[in-house]
Amino acid sequence: MLYRNRFKISYVVVSISLLILLITAVLTLVFTTRAQGGGGTVSGSQMKWHPLTIDFAGPTASETDDAPNPFLDYRLNVTLTAPSGATNVVPGFFAGDGSGGSIGNVWRIRFAPDEVGMWQYAASFREGNNVAIELDENAGTAVSFNGFSGSFQISNADPNADGFLPWGRLEYVNQHYLKFADGPYWIKGGVDSPENFLGYGDFDGTVDQGCRGLVHQYAPHLNDWQTGDPTWSNGKGKGIIGALNYLSSQNVNSIYILPMNLGGDGCETYPFVGGSGSDFDNTHYDVSKLHQWNIVLNHAQNVGIAPHFVLAETESGNENWFDNGSHGVKRKLYYRELIARFGYLLTGKWNISEENDFSVSEIQSFAGYIQALDWSDKPIAVHTKPNNFRDYDDLMGDGRFSASSIQYAPDQAGGHVETWRANSANAGRPWVLDMDENNPAGSGLTDSNAADLRKRVLYEVNFSGGHVE
């Protein structure tokens, strides 16, 4: 009995000693890892093509801070290395508390991995005046979690996943059609209206700034929302989610989106904390609104609808909203924020401007900056005025552009497609021929003209090798 008690005591002493050694080893490993850099928090299904986020705990900030400004005076870039050794540099953004709250210490990237296997990542986090818009990797000063690194494992794509997820990224492949990386070629059949699709009353901070009062509710589509679909803020969002469900059920696969229409036809759609046009408003982004936009755009991806991002309008007030129309700090920040938050989407198109008035050199500069930031390499285009191709001859063969965006008279649609297919192919860079917005603008597509426009536009464009929105 005494022997067994001594054995129990000895066993307990040894167990405690081993436990202490184990805790000491773990703590040593933890503190050693932190001292060498540490890592981020990886979230998502960790499957090929599925959205993935990496969060880092950094400086605590508010979306209205100005010294430093969390959107402009910090820059997060994360280098991701695929199993093959290929690398992507993905821009990050200030995410508040990570769940839409405007105050927090979460700095985030969104990514869609395109290979199966073990990935590595390494964070660059820099601070400095206007450092966010700088392309020089050494701009600013390394701070906080700079150098943090880690790894994650990606498994095979789910062939039964929703929307575009089984097929992967929609890519320009030097042909007149885009192609999914693991899937078929794509023919766009989209809607070009409403231009202010994101001018929706359930989004935080979405109010008319004194124009037309065109804040949508999408009430007819509340019944198209389905159980299991996303919402936010205790049930908000059902109208716009239902609208996407309806469009998907009608086989619509693209939608026109203005992220910023201040100074344009409307004045209720903008990603900023305010719509005044002040330097403060134009350099501070609404964290909760953009969190909600992402819920909607991710759902669009899941129901097979690609966003056509139109980055400016033809009205002079909108064209000159940033930097008096130049390629300055505020325009660059606008591009960076959109790419950082929505570049992970598998489909999409960056359109420099509706009915473009910018010079060729300006749109080339804008497109070059977008291309330098956009690791996903989405097509870049610029929209024409009706049947007016003043810019296109100068853009043929330019590696920054891979698609058209043509506004047209119905009887000329097929001819435009054939002309610019030939012109772009002869220039050595075949364009994807997108016919975006038919005239007259006041009528659009209606129950009474659908049969006529199906013959005069849809058939003519598709059979000529183009796409319709």
Image: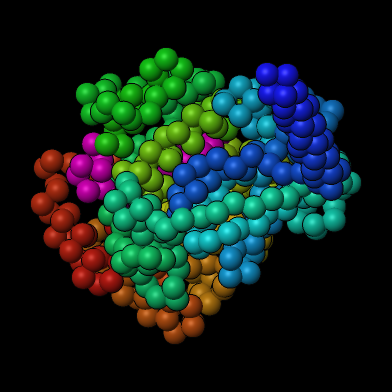
Of 398 and 262, nearer the camera is 398
Looking at the magenta stretch, what is its main secondary structure?
Answer: loop
The quarter of the displayed image where residue 462 is located = bottom left
Residue farthest toward the right in the current orientation of the protein: 141
Task: Identify which residue is drawn at 29% across, 62% down.
Answer: 187
Left/right of residue 33 with respect to residue 362 in the rendered view: right
Q: Residue at x 27, y 36 (%)?
A: 245
Viewer-side residue, 377 vs 463 = 377
Q: Is residue 415 left or right of residue 311?
A: left
Where in the figure is residue 87, as x and y percent of width and height?
Answer: 64, 64
326 to 321, vertically: above or below = below
In this picture, is 242 found above or below 174?
A: above
- Left or right of 97: which side holds 49? left
* Residue 77 percent coordinates (x, y): 71, 50
Magenta run includes residue 251: yes
What segment is highlighted magenta in the picture? Answer: 246-266
* Residue plotted at (60% across, 58% down): 119
Check the image and tell me how it is coloured. rainbow
Residue 114 at what x, y percent from top left?
A: 50, 61
Q: Is residue 27 visible?
A: no
Given the current orientation, which residue lies at the most extreme top position? 234
Question: Is residue 344 or residue 275 the one in the foreground?
Answer: 344
Q: Position of residue 91 (x, y in %)?
A: 66, 49
* Residue 185 shown in magenta: no
Q: Quadrant of residue 400?
A: bottom right
Residue depicted at 65% across the width and 57% down the height: 120
Q: Give residue 168's quadrant in the image.
A: bottom left
Regarding residue 411, the answer to whether it shows in the image is: yes
